[in-house]
Image (cartoon, rainbow, N blue to C red):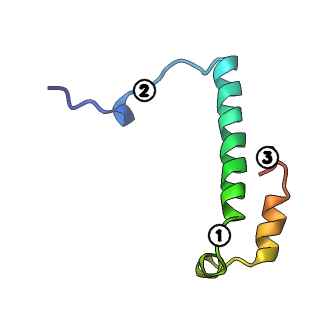
Amino acid sequence: MSLCTYENVTNNHEAGPLDRVGRQFQVWFTRWRQRDELTHWSDRDLHDVGLSWSDVVREAEKPFWRA
């Protein structure tokens, strides 16, 4: 049985252009999804994490490509 895990494996190959594009699309999709989810939170949820509705609106109005 091998004790080798993913974290112990080193990738010595540089990511190709398609890999980089795919990762960028993943980042954009994640941002869009998280911002959309934030707009559905309740007042109590927002209060628990210290956000106001103006914070949510400001974040939700950002385009997906902006961090």
Q: Is residue 50 above or below residue 25?
A: below
Mark 1 residue type? Trp
Of mark 2 and mark 3, the one earlier in the sequence is 2
The disc placed on residue 41 is 1
Of mark 1 and mark 3, the one earlier in the sequence is 1
> Dots 1 and 2: beta carbons under 8 Å?
no
Q: Residues within 10 Å of mark 2 (few under 14, many from 20)?
A: few
Q: CA distance from mark 2 to mark 3?
A: 31 Å
Q: CA distance from mark 1 to mark 2?
A: 40 Å
Q: Nearer the viewer, mark 2 or mark 3?
A: 3
On screen, residue 9 versus residue 31, left or right, reads left
Mark 2 residue type? Thr
The disc placed on residue 64 is 3
Mark 3 residue type? Phe
Residue visible at 76% across and 69% down in the picture: 56
* Residue under numbered circle 2: 10
